[in-house]
Amino acid sequence: MKAEGRVGTIAASDGSFNTLRTATDGGLVTQIGGGKYVEAALAGRLFSVANQAAVITTAALATNWKGLCVSNPTTSGKNIIILEFGWSLSVVGPADGVVGLMTATNAAMTSAITPVPAMNGQGAAVAICDTVNATIGTPILERICGTIGTGTTATQLSVPQSIYDVGGSIILPPGRAVLTYTTQACTAAVVFYFLFEEVDV
């Protein structure tokens, strides 16, 4: 049996059957038009969160942590899939060190920042996003994402924002959180962001 596909866009409704799509060179099209996250965005599963101002961070694996986190409540009924993580300095950073991601159990997180749906103005996330919590469970460093350092303000600000493609390789079931990590404690200098998807457990 010969498999065939249709070249060009296909108009289809939910639940209908249709042919596969190919590009003009015969290659199978497996990506929805508009970008790799558009399907999750249109379905109301995609969210982002960012510090609205530069934040203080704590050193390494401190449990009196500060930075930015995405926390999945124990009663959410969702898994949170981390897709991207980013950071940038707004002023001179701390001593040279690592930027990374660590995970921990939730511990009385409060919603300091409201995540934004990718479908702007549509729906709310179950995630609780915090910038400071003194009672997190013992964290574990999971990813080394980049560095920050002690360069002059002009030098630091000339460096573009750093983006780490987590690509869904960190998934938070209910009761777990992902938190920013910096080797050195930092004054209010860093702005962080996360992009994540919420799916039913």
Image (cartoon, helix red, strand yellow):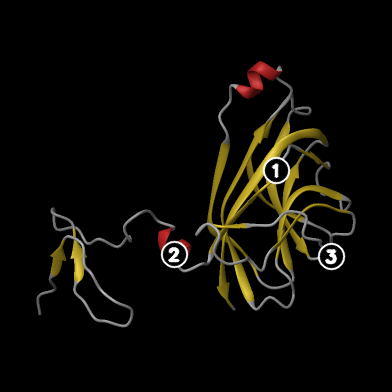
* Residue 68 position in % (x across, y down): 73, 49
- Marks 3 and 2 sit apart, C-alpha to C-alpha, by 32 Å
Q: Which image quadrant is residue 172 in?
A: bottom right
Q: Residue at x 22, y 62 (%)?
A: 28
Locate residue 201, reporting x and y percent: 59, 78
Q: Quarter-wise, where is residue 54 in the image?
A: top right
Identify the element where label 2 is drawn.
helix
Residue kind at label 2, given as amino acid type: Leu
Q: Residue at x 65, y 23 (%)?
A: 156
- State which tag comes first along the sequence, 2 or 1: 2
Earlier sequence position, callout 3 versus callout 1: 1
**Of 47 and 146, the residue lying toward us:** 47
- The dot on residue 42 is 2
In the image, farthest residue toward the front = 121
Q: Mark 3, mark 2: which one is toward the viewer?
A: 2
Q: CA distance from mark 2 to mark 1?
A: 25 Å
Q: CA distance from mark 3 to mark 1?
A: 23 Å
**Residue 140's quadrant in the figure?**
bottom right
Q: Residues within 10 Å of mark 3 (few under 14, many from 20)?
A: some
Q: Amino acid at mark 3?
A: Ala
In the structure shown, which secondary structural element does the residue marked by tag 1 occupy? loop
Q: Are marks 3 and 2 in contact (CB under 8 Å)?
A: no
Q: Residues within 10 Å of mark 2 (few under 14, many from 20)?
A: some
Q: Position of residue 141 (x, y in %)?
A: 72, 52
Image-based side of 109 in relation to 152, left or right: right
Query: First in sequence: mark 3 or mark 2?
Result: 2
Tag 3 secondary structure: loop
Q: Measured from the top left, where is residue 23 in percent x and y?
A: 18, 56
Residue displayed at 73% across by 78% down:
75
Residue under label 1: 52
Left or right placement of residue 160 versus residue 2 in this view: right
| Residue highlighted by disc 3 | 107
